[in-house]
Image: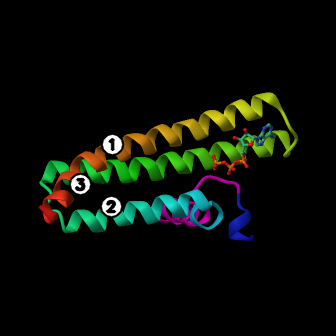
Amino acid sequence: MDENKKSTKNRRYIDSFKYAFIGITTVFREERNMRTHVTLGLTAILLSLFCNLTTIEWLWMLLCVFLVFVMEIWNTVIENVVDLVVDHHFHPIAKKAKDMAAAAVLLTSLFSLIVGGTILLPKIFSWFV
Ligand SMILES: Nc1ncnc2c1ncn2[C@@H]1O[C@H](COP(=O)(O)OP(=O)(O)OP(=O)(O)O)[C@@H](O)[C@H]1O
């Protein structure tokens, strides 16, 4: 049987990891927004490496980066399920679901921007004064 076309439960933990990894690579390959989030997240982590963060600050930064990734993955899940259900035809409830999923990503990104800015900006300014 073609492994990519199976629709039964994973029997082994290694299979669960394998399909989760395929999910990550698929969302990265197919969603431009996900690639932007990864680029911005990696930039924030790279900057943090030069900013001498405390353990708590590191945990906040990592929480924000992972939250945005997870929210973008859920947004993509909802887009895919909606497209599957309405078969790409216009439907007001499809629009509502997709707009709300996009709103969740927007709010998480704004929250991350506030946290990242609060932690990193004072440290970056202190390099120049
Ligand atoms: N089947 C549909 N019926 C009604 N409106 C839709 C439908 N599909 C998409 N839309 C509208 O188009 C917008 C963009 O949908 P699309 O599936 O292209 O997501 P996207 O451009 O990948 O969005 P995002 O930037 O959140 O990833 C939705 O937020 C919604 O307003």
The label on residue 44 is 2
Does residue 25 belong to the magenta stretch?
yes
Give 10 or 129, whichever is nearer the viewer.
129
Tell me the residue at 48%/62% (across/down): 17
Q: Secondary structure at mark 3?
A: helix
The label on residue 120 is 3
Amino acid type at mark 1: Ile
| Disc nearer the start of the sequence (3/2) | 2
The label on residue 114 is 1
Q: Are marks 1 and 3 in contact (CB under 8 Å)?
A: no
**Residue extending farthest front:** 129
State the CA–CA distance, disc 1 to disc 3. 10 Å
Count neighbours of disc 1 (C-alpha within 10 A) and say few if under 14, some if 14 to 19, many if 20 or more: few
Tell me the residue at 24%/45% (across/down): 118
Judge left or right: residue 18 versus residue 116.
Answer: right
Tell me the residue at 71%/43% (across/down): 81
State the CA–CA distance, disc 2 to disc 1. 12 Å
